[in-house]
Structures are given as structure tokens and as C-alpha cells.
Image (tube, grey):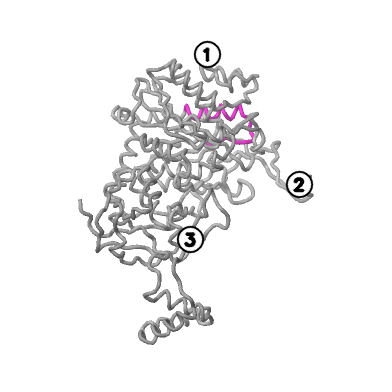
Amino acid sequence: MLFATLLTASLLGAPRPAALLTPFERDPAHNTTATYAECLAFYKDLAAAHPATVQLREAGLTDSGQPLHEVVLSADGTFEPAASRAKGRPVLFVQNGIHPGEPEGIDASMMLARDLLRDKKLLPLLQRVTLVIVPAYNVDGMLNRNSTTRANQNGPREYGFRGNARHLDLNRDFVKQDSRNARSFAALFQKWRPEVFIDTHTSNGADYQYTITLIPTQHNKLAPALGAYLQGQLLPALYAGMAQKKWPMTPYVDFEGETPESGLRAFMESPRYSTGYAALFNSIGFMPETHMLKAFGPRVRATYDLLVTYVQTVAAQAPAVLAARAAADQALGTQTRFPLAWALRDTATTTVQFRGYEAGHKPSAVSGQPRLYYDRSRPYTRPVPYYNTARPTVVAEAPQAYIIPAAWTEVLDNLRRNGVVLRPLAEPLAGSGATYTIEDYKTTPRPYEGHYLHSQVKLRPLQPAPATNLGPAYLAVLAEQGPARRYLVEALEPQATDSFFAWGFFDSVLQQKEHYSDYVFEDLAADLLAKQPALREQLEAAKKAEPALAASGPRQLEWVYQHSPYAEPGYRRYPVVRWLGPVLR
């Protein structure tokens, strides 16, 4: 009960009308999270009580059929992006409930919105920052309420389900955008282009003393100006602010060994994740992760205090964050080389004074085999290595433009939705176009989020693109893309970790449509080799280089076919053309 008293007192100094108390606050045990109906009703009541400083708006549909909502808070009714930036206000965007079984952000944001509008000490912050809140992103999962699917989690009593109405994990959907949730989000994100983006979560994994941990965008993956600002100003202020509020934080507890002492590793979020997607557009992303084994009350309180700290910090550092974003956008406008995949270096960047629990092994009551356990009676604080330096493993030189055949409508729709400017190309172009051929790739043996994901893509050297393949089509000129420039490259370069090719958008070109009967083609192949001595020499060289080819008649016949005029030209030819020459205006 002491915590309940402190919670109510700290969130707002004065008593509140019962109608604007959240279900979490009304529960003496603080073990209740709002339902979707309760959450939406709360924001409707808040908007009705404060029409000059808050707006609740629909922002597209979700797969549940229910709308996605945005809540915009401003001290003087500045509810649009252009007006906000004209007043020198960065945009802080908070998204909740992407995994509705991790609902702390849902409840904390409800209280945050109310307190920012009603607490005279907090309201002035909204004169220096515009706050946008998505109350619940995975509305579908929030409606699918239960009390069992989060087996490792300590409360609340009931919560939503991780998957959405199509059984998709929405935090893997930010590039492929299979869900209506992701499509609505993309439009909302492109509208606001926030300087700072926050996606609230609850962790799984090791046991330790912290109630809350933090995943920031890996700083090397940001533009230099943003990475330097994140490391030098924003993160230190967030950690200091939370320490003042009696919530020590640590980087997200991800590690390769059995326990955290093996070293913390920065989470390398690719663009399929919310924060990885945000980074493509020069937004600094964060995933706060409360610890599943702590009680729900402290988890909500820690999330609330972190959100307050974000608002305070971004408001105080508004000129710095706006300057860093502007510098990053300017650099993006002339960038020509783009990293497509990343890996952490094996050398620790620094050490973290980590507050953990000693771990050990004991016989399992289930199997009798040794099992891991953490001993909460033996807390420790000790230095742990932190691996937080990343290097690009694949880099591409961007072309002047990409040409996408009009037939690939799903690709074109995704590009447009994410801010890419496309020009219709009615006439075929000839000359400076080149295409990839997919030489090899690996594919997951089981479906992953509705797709068989490709990786380890190997490409043949670029080949001139036939003019007949270039129209009707759409032209995406790199110089015209503005904030979408990096997104465009990572979406269309097949070797990128989360490219459209990796997600299977172009799988139909990986299946051969025409072939041969071997007994018929034997004679054609022999005639080709007889008439083209150079081709025969190539075959002999290939046989010497590949013993398996030399030992197989069918493979040699296939080799001749693939090097003959009869080979299917579109097979494994990546249909997006890289335009290397000048582009007419």
C-alpha cells in the first residue's frame, strides 16, 4: 500500500476526478491494465476536457477493423507537424501496445497525457516539444485478452496477445507491411517524421536488479550527427534523469553467454523492427524494456517516469536535437554509399556497472537435469563488458535512379506509402540501365512472419538491362527522395537484410518457366559446342574447376543450356533496374 500512496502522489500533486483515473490507478493492487475500450474512452474524456491542448484522431485502420488512433498534445493547440516545426518544436512520438501482453506503456501514457495537461509544472514542456501518442498499435491483439500467454511475466491479471488478427508479430512488419496496422502506421510516421521515436515493451531473458532497461538505435547505424548527439547528450541525460527518479537503468540485457557477465551486446535492430525502420528516416529510436519478473505496478511507474524524462530531456535539448536531425538530413541528401547489413565488433566498447544476481545450476524438478537459476539473495554490482560498436558488412553504391516495372504493384504501393517519389515512365529507356542476377541465396526452412525469408544473397556482376524490360515502369530518382533516400536503397538492394527481395516480394523470378527435354536438347547442345569453340573451352574450364560438374552429364547439359540463347532471360534476373546514367528532369 505504500507504493500505491507514492504512485498517486507522485504522478500528480492534486487529487484527480475519478473519471480520469486509469484502471491501473483504481486497482489497489496496481495489477490491472486498461482494456481497449477503457483506453479509448479515457482519451476521449481527456480530449473533451482539454480541447485546446489535446486532440484524439483516427489514423487509418488495423487488421481488427478498428481504427488506429493518434493523440496529439500541445500547450497552444499546435496539432500539425509543419506548425510544430515552425515554432522550433521537435516531435516526440510514443507508440504503445505493439505487443499488448507488454502493456506498461499503454497505462503509463494515459497518465502521462493527463498529467502533462493538468500539472502546472509539466504543462510548459508542451511549449517546447510536440507529443504524439499511439495509445495502442496492435488493437487486434489488445482485444484478444487472456491471462496465460505470457508465462514468464509477473502481472497484470489480464493482458492482450502478442500476435495481431492475422497472427503477425507487428514488430517484424515495418518493411514488408503485410498488416493494415503497419500501413496505417507508415502514413502516420511519414506525416510526423519524429525526431525521437519510442516503442514501449517488456523484456524476457535473464534475471537482474533493474526494473527497466533501454534499447537505443545502435549509434553507428545513425548519421554521424545523430549518433554523436545520441551518445554525447541524449543518452546521458536520460540515464541521469532516471537515476534522479530512483530508477537506475542499464542497456538492454542481451548477451551471447549463459548469463549477463559474458557481456552485454547492443541489439542490432534491422528495419523490420520499429526502431530500425525509424532510423532509415533519421529518427532516433528507443525501445524501453521493463523487466518481466518485477511486479506490474513498478513496471508501469518506471515507464511513466521514463516517458516524463523523455519529454523533459527533448524539451530541454530541442535546439540540439533539431540541429542534429537537420545535419543528418543534409548529409543524406548527398550520400551515395549505403550500408545494407551490420555486425557488432568483437571488441567491447566500454564496461557497464551491472546490477545482477549470482547464477548457478541445480537439478530440475521436471527432468532431473541441471537447470539455470538466479539467486536473488545474492545481488552484485560488477563491471560487465558492453559491445556497442557496429561495422557494415555489406555496402552498396547507389545508382542515379531505380526503375521498377509497373507489374510489381505491391512493391510500388509500399514505396509510395513510405514517402518515395515515383515518376511514371511511359517510354522505354535504353543505355545506362543494369540489372542483377541472383546467383545464390539461403531461405528459412519454415515461414517467418508469413514469409520464407531470404539471406546470404549472392549476385552476379551487373549486366546491361534490355530496353524492352524498362517500360511501362516507374522511375525513382535518388536525388528526388529527400528523407526516403536511405529507405529506398535498403528496400530495393537485394543484399540488404530487410530488402523486398529478402521478404520474398520478387520470388516469382526465382522459378524457371521454360526448360527442355534432355534427350532433345542433347543434340542442340552438341551442335552449339561444335559451332562455338569458345563455349566448349568455357565448359572444359568449368569442369576442371568443379569436379562435381565434370562427373555429371545432366549438370553439363544444364551448364550448356544456361550459357545458350535458349536460356530463359528472366530467370533469376532481378526485375528492378539500376539506372546509372543521368536522369532527365
Q: Are marks 2 and 3 in contact (CB under 8 Å)?
A: no
Quadrant occupied by the N terminus: top right
Task: Return the residue nearer the eye: 554 or 318.
Answer: 554
- Residue 23, horizontal then vertical, whole percent: 58, 21
Q: Mark 2 points at which residue?
A: 362
Question: Residue at point 49% right, 78% down?
Answer: 518
Q: Name the residue under label 1.
A: 16
- Image quarter for residue 32? top right
Query: Within 10 Å of the Cα at label 3, are there few (<14), some (14-19), or many (20+) other Cα atoms?
Result: some
Q: Which amino acid does label 1 sit on?
A: Arg
Q: Overall secondary structure of the magenta stretch?
A: helix
State the extent of the magenta-drawn residues as a range: 288-308
Secondary structure state at the residue bearing disc 3 = strand
Report how far apart the C-alphas of labels 1 and 3 lie in the structure. 57 Å
Specify whether 480 is left or right of 244. left
Q: Mark 3 points at which residue?
A: 456
- Residue 94, horizontal then vertical, whole percent: 46, 32
